[in-house]
Image (spheres, coloured by chain):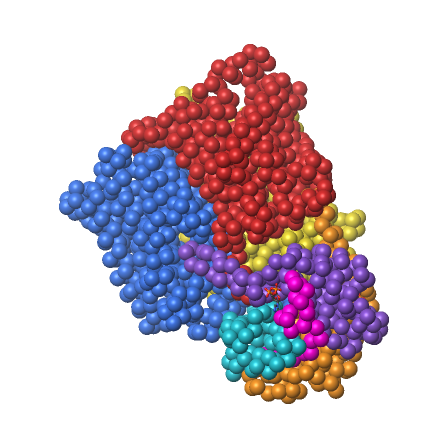
Chain colours: A red, B orange, C purple, D cyan, E yellow, F blue
């Protein structure tokens, strides 16, 4: 144990970061069930498969390309060269990959029930391999971040503060989804002669399960974002909890007891707290979550009913809008006079939010636009009518029920 | 023989079944159906969107009886299924020309 | 009275119901059935094994109407349910000898 | 035309369908029903409490055929569905006045 | 890393306690699915929503009121004042809150399928904000516990020993549920003309999922109850496991292979082992679990069929009776001659159990009695018939199935 | 905290090992749902019950017998005698037990839908109490392993390398299942007059849930197999992830988007990476996973359709074949020239794989053969037709649906 104790801090950091990584990995099961519950039965299998395949493809893409873009480390070499610090860098890769993999999982919820499998997965490869890492490199990574954030600090007095990715992960994912959704168009029958005809979801227990898995895993997402055990902060944990509570209570109040708004309200709160969870007051976190739920409820209805955008899970308001709100909220509730820890600039945050918005929408249009040209994005009418399960996976979610009589 | 088809409220099934057994019915067949009629459906609300649920869950009872028993059976069902509120349902009487018991091959009234 | 039974494609239900309402039908009963006919089923594949799904989901509509309305109702259903593609379904006309409204005990055409 | 309605044991469906196809039936409609009759239900037990399950899952087959084929079809069903044990079910023959093929508008025996 | 290594013990305690807190948070998903599976389909959404909203409301109540009652610490101040020891106190709050939030989740299972949402949630606020903290302050907390436990020790030779809350959490919750259940009365159709007519449950896989989530999370509940990493005990972990095994095997034997008794048997064993998990022998833990399953099976049937109390999930026998059994069992199997570690008094335990019983029943009657007067507890007949999902949340668990035909 | 810091390394090892143990415990929920989803509705309850009771019986058996066979430690003594190092040995027991309990859980998937409950559970007792511990003692344990592995090393230049149990756990379990499956025979109606008539599975979302739970828990299975925190290796974690990704992508490619092959492909990859996860290159791990999915897809179809063996979940190809493949793969991809860390012998691995195969098949035939003689293995035709749920547990998975109409 003599030797052991010396490398204990390093072993511990691996353990710590790995706990976070596995927790975020589990969030992907959450994404899968959230979507499976929110689509119709005939698209449940597709929802589940998209997410699990996504994670795998993102793993490859980020290992081979993305991580070296953002963090200037290449892993294509003998194992002996990867074992420095007991493989700490590899675990860091695992942890950060889990963020990268969220981008496509977020998009998935927006484009559900009508998108082809191949272009969807191809997009996932580029999202985790290129699109996300470039933005990561700018805000968090080792490549451009020092210079860029230095410049931001010079202009606004503080760098863009995004502790756990309200903007870098959720904002980015949510706004990349928008062009994909627009390029696809609404599901058949969603808007008939300009009138909205809501399509009922299949399974609220699945949705609730997905939401719970996401909530639990999110504590890895936020807490372990300190990346070093010695920097762990109880404030981050409790702020995450308070924002969840705010989001849920907001879902009850603004969503009138609606189970969809309540379970997604928790996620809205969590999206919004990521950026400032290390600096705001727990009471501030509660308010951030409450407002996030308000934003989600109102913007979701506006998006669906007024703008007539068929964003099935509401990922643009949930991740997109609330990601930006989270970034800006850190610049408000992080201030000392609102009982935050300070050291953050409202204008830098606003700048970060706008930057995220612009980068995401442009990147999304280019990526999905190109894929639309090259492979087409959308299932044929008949395939969509049959359901993605049958037309892509040749089986439905409950085979026994189909075959029996 | 007649086939008596009754569309009733689901929670009345037990009572109707018991009443029919009492008047000498030995077999019947039920199925889940949805009804549309004077009884209004309701709306459900999810994430701000309204779904109109027009079709109301009902239970259909089918029972084939000898002509002699038909009227009795109709009355029994009507009495047992009545709540007096809209949506109580209907009973229809349909002619049946023949019946067979699969197990034995018996025909006609013996088969039911 | 007649009972009109129609087997139709499920996604046509809404249209048929609306059309029937327009010609003065105030009540009907629907159920989920599976059909077997000229329209071919499909195969599903799971872990390398094929399942043949012969039976295709259909919706059955049952509506009892006065003799005078029967022909009109048949036509209305046929028009509303037609897509022109195989599997559109059938309409059958069956005699009904009596009808009762459970709530009131009314009989015959008044009951429907 | 006649409508032949058969209530059979669910696991016999495949056999009955195949037998009917052989005697020239081109279409039929099936649905899940529950039956109550001589065949006793069973009890289920959960946390010390008993539930009596009276209604036994059955399958209903409906097939409309020309008068000439009716007897043949009845026999075919009876033979294919028989296990000889209680609960094998019934076949009923019901008059049908008209039939329409929705796709083409054909009427009568041509429609089935 | 120089600085890091010095605060490592403190960082580690945060990590450790936080792992426990998050595991117990996940147990609430378990409560939700256990209930969703045990009620009828028309009340599944309500089961899920009650639990998740509960946790949120408890978070607020315990943050603002409860924690300061039990632990004399007020959190309403600037974030800088919360960051001592990297926010350790906040994480302790998170951990202990998760116990507080269990009370209402336990009650939920008893009053399922017929209670109004508003009074249910209001009760949850007072349970986590006042009722539980007062009792906590007496047995565990910093306010009255030193004096009170000193007095108990003086009388009985040892203080009341309740390592992880058999009495303080489960006993309390289970017995608070009883008055609520009695004040509500049985569900419509549960007892007809004095005869019991069991209402079938909807979904055993959900119930099993809930049970598994609870089992897994319970290791956080028990192990992290040491609150300090350096006090972690392998015995606590293995005793928890042995009691689970005993409860499950008891469910098989006494419950005759019944899946409900088996999956709840695990929970019965876990409820009973909380109090003495740090002092009994693993074989003793197994026996404690076995007996707990026996108690649950027999008492559940007695309660439902003879006393005709409509306790839907059986929370009075599961948490109430077994909580007390756990307290007493620690006084038996904790003794040295039964291979325990000793240092525990049977009479102190019995006293603790009785105290729990009395406090809970009285508090429950006052709280739910007052709410009954003020807002009414019960859904109208028609609402209950329609189901809580439709009448409270205006949607059912499987919307697509309803709307289709 | 003075005292605390001295025993910190020991406390930490308990925490670390316990985290692993609880993660593997959760995998049993994964086994339960994987099976519940893959059987017909009428056997879902039985699937769930088998697994949870299994774990309990294995706990007893391994505590009383198995652990002392493999590790020469007897736990039947006063608690004070178990508290050395804060109960570290107990936690080690917990961790290793979780491997032992997998054996019967693996068999369960093969014999599903037709096996009697009593002999199934009895077998589970002997598997965890005797059959597995003997093999464990040979490869990993303290009893014969030193001498035996010394001999292997003498012959082949390196001992049998099985870091986390590709062979010792999965290979063993998978091949023990084969005789059980053969002795039972196929389910009624599975092969009619020599023709294969596939039986449709009930629920793909349950299957997916099971798969996800297994994937997440597997990181405890593999990473914590270092058993000491100071030996934690980032490589193990990332290799597990890469093999999962390989298995999933293999499922997509070789299984043609089939959700069953994709979700089981992940598991195939994980089975295969266990043995060499500490020594192969992440790219090697990806290839190992890819090949594992290929093996699973092809062998599953061959087993079911050509050999006509009714292995319901495909546990022989999944755990059996891929377990052996994992052992051998460690001997290939662990070599330095394939960018592995070296120190492993191909022939020792091949020998280990064959040894596993022979031991498992022989032990399985003896155990299940004896049980067949003594108690009979198979449900009666009528019981099987009614379903195991009704005939063994007297209830179905969805009681409300049955009773309603
Ligand atoms: N003409 C009809 N043909 C077939 N079914 C009918 C007809 N009219 C009503 N029904 C069935 O009877 C049910 C009850 O009818 P409704 O008009 O709502 O109330 P009431 O029976 O009190 O008149 C309907 O839901 C429907 O299932
Ligand atoms: N003789 C019949 N009796 C009862 N139902 C029938 C009959 N023939 C067809 N059907 C029903 O009508 C549906 C449509 O019939 P099908 O032969 O597929 O196409 P089409 O209606 O275009 O001729 C079938 O799925 C079945 O439910
Ligand atoms: N008079 C009847 N009317 C309608 N359906 C009947 C009638 N009698 C029996 N059945 C149906 O036939 C099924 C089998 O009848 P049962 O009396 O159990 O056995 P058997 O057919 O051998 O006489 C019942 O479950 C029920 O669905």
Q: Residue at x 50, y 38 (%)?
A: A375
Which residue is at the front of the view, A13 or D63?
Answer: D63
Task: Name the spot of residue A322 as percent of width and height, x first.
Answer: 62, 31
**Residue F334, quarter of the rendered image:** top left
**Residue B58, quarter of the rendered image:** bottom right
* Quadrant of image for the C terminus of chain C: bottom right
Q: Residue furthest top?
A: A154
The stretch in magenta equals D88-112
**Magenta-drawn stretch contains A2:** no
* Quadrant of image for the N terminus of chain C: bottom right
Quarter holding ligand 2: bottom right
User: Does residue A29 sit above or below C40 in this rendering?
Assistant: above
Q: Residue at x 66, y 47 (%)?
A: A189
Task: Name the spot of residue F274 as percent of width and height, x first.
Answer: 33, 44
**Magenta-drawn stretch contains D99:** yes
Task: Evaluate whether residue F26 shows in this view.
Answer: no
User: Does residue E74 sit above or below F85 in this rendering?
Assistant: above
Total labels drawn: 0
Task: Name the spot of residue B108 as percent of width and height, x first.
Answer: 65, 87
Which residue is at the front of the view, E271 or A254?
Answer: A254
Q: Residue at x 23, y 54 (%)?
A: F355
Which residue is at the front of the view, E227 or D4?
Answer: D4
User: Does residue E312 sit above or below A102 in this rendering?
Assistant: below
Task: Name the spot of residue F124 as percent of width and height, x first.
Answer: 37, 60
User: Does residue E59 sit above or below A335 in this rendering?
Assistant: below
**Residue A270, quarter of the rendered image:** top right
Q: Residue at x 64, y 53 (%)?
A: E400
With F356 as the anchor, is E174 left or right in this view?
Answer: right
Task: Evaluate whether residue F301 shows in this view.
Answer: yes
């Amino acid at each position: 144990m003599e030797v052991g104790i010396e490398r204990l801090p390093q072993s511990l950091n691996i353990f710590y970061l790995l706990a976070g990584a596995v927790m975020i990995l589990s969030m992907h099961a959450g994404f899968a069930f959230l979507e499976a519950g929110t689509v119709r039965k005939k698209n449940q299998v597709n929802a589940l498969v998209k997410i699990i395949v996504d994670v795998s493809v993102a793993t490859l893409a980020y290992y081979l390309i993305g991580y070296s873009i953002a963090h200037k480390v290449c892993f294509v070499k003998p194992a002996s060269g990867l074992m420095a610090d007991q493989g700490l860098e590899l675990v860091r890769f695992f942890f950060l990959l889990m963020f990268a993999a969220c981008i496509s999982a977020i998009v998935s919820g927006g484009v559900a029930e009508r998108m082809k499998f191949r272009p969807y997965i191809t997009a996932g490869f580029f999202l985790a391999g290129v699109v996300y890492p470039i933005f990561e490199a700018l805000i968090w990574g080792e490549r451009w971040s020092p210079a860029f954030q230095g410049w931001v600090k010079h202009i606004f007095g503080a760098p863009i503060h995004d502790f756990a990715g309200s903007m870098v992960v959720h904002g980015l994912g949510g706004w990349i989804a928008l062009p994909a959704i627009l390029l696809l168009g609404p599901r058949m029958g969603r808007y008939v002669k300009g009138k909205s005809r809501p399509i009922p979801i299949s399974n609220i227990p699945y949705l609730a399960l997905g939401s719970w898995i996401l909530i639990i895993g999110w504590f890895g997402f936020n807490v372990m974002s300190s990346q070093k055990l010695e920097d762990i902060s109880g404030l981050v944990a409790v702020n995450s909890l308070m924002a969840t509570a705010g989001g849920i209570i907001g879902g009850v109040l603004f969503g009138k007891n609606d189970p969809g708004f309540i379970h997604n309200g928790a996620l809205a709160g969590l999206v919004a707290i990521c950026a400032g969870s290390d600096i705001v007051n727990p009471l501030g976190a509660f308010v951030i979550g409450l407002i996030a739920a308000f934003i989600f409820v109102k913007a979701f209805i506006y998006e669906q009913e007024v703008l007539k955008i068929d964003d099935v899970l509401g990922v643009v308001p949930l991740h997109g809008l609330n990601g930006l709100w989270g970034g800006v909220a850190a610049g408000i509730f992080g201030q000392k006079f609102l009982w935050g820890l300070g050291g953050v600039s409202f204008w830098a945050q606003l700048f970060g939010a706008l930057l995220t918005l612009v980068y995401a929408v442009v990147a999304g249009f280019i990526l999905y636009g190109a894929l639309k040209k090259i492979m087409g994005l959308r299932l044929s009418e008949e395939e969509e009518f049959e359901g993605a399960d049958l037309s892509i996976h040749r089986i439905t979610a409950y085979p026994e029920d189909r075959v029996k009589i | 023989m007649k086939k008596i088809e009754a569309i009733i409220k689901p929670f009345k099934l037990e009572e109707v079944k018991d009443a029919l057994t009492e008047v000498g019915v030995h077999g019947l067949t039920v199925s889940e159906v949805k009804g549309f009629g004077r009884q209004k459906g309701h709306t459900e609300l999810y994430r701000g969107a309204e779904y109109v649920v027009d079709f109301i869950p009902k239970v259909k009872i089918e029972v084939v009886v000898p002509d002699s028993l038909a009227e009795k059976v109709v009355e029994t069902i009507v009495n047992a299924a009545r709540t007096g509120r809209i949506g109580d349902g209907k009973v229809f009487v349909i002619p049946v020309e023949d019946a067979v018991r699969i197990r034995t091959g018996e025909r006609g009234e013996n088969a039911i």
